[in-house]
Amino acid sequence: MQNSVKDKIPVTVLTGFLGSGKTTLLNYILKENHGMKIAVIENEFGEIGIDGGLVVGSTEEIFEMTNGCVCCVAEAREDLLRVIRQLLERPDRLDHIIIETSGLADPYPVAQTFFLDDPIREETNLDGVITLVDSKHIMQHLDDADIDALDNQAVDQIVCADRIVLNKIDLVTEDEVGNVTGRIARLNETAEIVQSSYAQIDLKRILGLAAFDRNRKMAAEIDLDSHDHHHRHPAPWEKKADHSHDASVTSVGIELSGHMDVQAILRWVQDIRKQDNRDLFRMKGIFSIKDDDYCYVLHGVHDQIEFRPNHPWADEPRCNRMVFIGRNLNREALQAQLTGCLAAA
Ligand SMILES: Nc1nc2c(ncn2[C@@H]2O[C@H](COP(=O)(O)OP(=O)(O)OP(=O)(O)O)[C@@H](O)[C@H]2O)c(=O)[nH]1
């Protein structure tokens, strides 16, 4: 006998372009007192993984997948299946699984996993695809002239969503919120759009949507209602699985031993802010600062850059790791700039 939806473990696919606020939302979810046992699977784009170190420590379990993008690298998809199967075999039942895709992922192939593979199809239910949108930077990526519009991940992520979180509204005017909302609504007519700052939203609006069943029903209804037929977006299982990333977007990962000079990093950040950063999509870093017990993190999304102490170093080895994602990155120059921020021994 088949499991009914209520016996299945709900799975949320959390997607959104680089820097839109997925990890921020994840941390918010993990800190909320919801009483649920949640497992989180993270998949990052970039030469070195940083996100695992940026997700809050909690009773929930976090699985990092850094061996390629889960939407297009076969080994990474196999890995995802393996992790989910392991989670399903555990005697203590999970209340929810959240999969954070990389910022350049097409969420369709990830969502498809839950329709194609047993026992995953039998024991889980795709609760919904949640797409985070950076209100300040999304237009640039939707209008990216350098990539084929048919394979624009920022567009795919919005089209695929069951719910859209329009994040970072603190960085834009009301008019800009209106423009972005209109643009998103034209790409996806059915997903509800909720606004947030630092991804602070009522979790009831993003977890427990059971969107797959609703989508299927909705698709059937729209099919019957012929006048709107041609506007229907493909459901996850209907879209092609083959997908390749915009090859002009690459990543540079840098690891340095020793400790950094905090003032030198602050000066370097000021220099970066003065540059034209349209091609610098994302920077993420973890730093060990000389004579400081805190692990510092650096986040950059184009020219929005923050650098702050994050948590005291505990048992983990101190390290300096930084990843840059964008176009036309100059590895040697970035390496030299960061090396120049090392503190004297
Ligand atoms: N001003 C502002 N900054 C935000 C907001 N939400 C997130 N941020 C900042 O934006 C940066 C990126 O946030 P993340 O949560 O790491 O974004 P992400 O989607 O996980 O990024 P990737 O891992 O690159 O895909 C961080 O510096 C956050 O603190 C917001 O609503 N307003």
Image (cartoon, grey):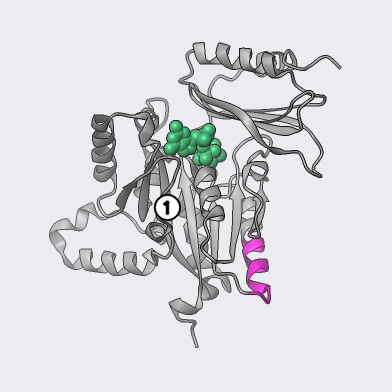
* Rendered residue at 62%/62% (across/down): 81
User: Three-letter amino acid code at disc 1?
Assistant: Ile
Magenta stretch encompasses residue 242: no
Q: Position of residue 22 (x, y in %)?
A: 50, 44
Please state which of residues 157 and 170 is positioned toward the viewer in this rendering.
170
Q: Which residues are magenta?
A: 81-92
Q: Up-down: is 83 above or below 166?
A: below
Residue furthest out toward the left = 227
Q: In the image, is residue 290 above or below residue 225?
A: above
Q: Main secondary structure of the magenta part?
A: helix
Check if residue 86 falls in the magenta segment.
yes
Q: Residue at x 25, y 45 (%)?
A: 185
Quadrant occupied by the C terminus: top right
Q: Residue at x 39, y 44 (%)?
A: 156
Relative to residue 280, is residue 159 depicted above or below?
Answer: below
Regarding mark 1 in the picture, which secondary structure is present there? strand
Viewed as shown, does residue 232 lie left or right of 201?
A: left
What residue did someone put label 1 on?
130
Quarter occupied by residue 87: bottom right
Residue 19 appearing in the image: no
Rendering coords of residue 261 (x, y %): 73, 18
* Foreground pick, 311 / 168: 311
Nearer the observer, 305 or 73 = 305
Q: For the image shown, how many numbered marks are present on the structure?
A: 1
Tell me if I can see residue 7 in this picture: yes
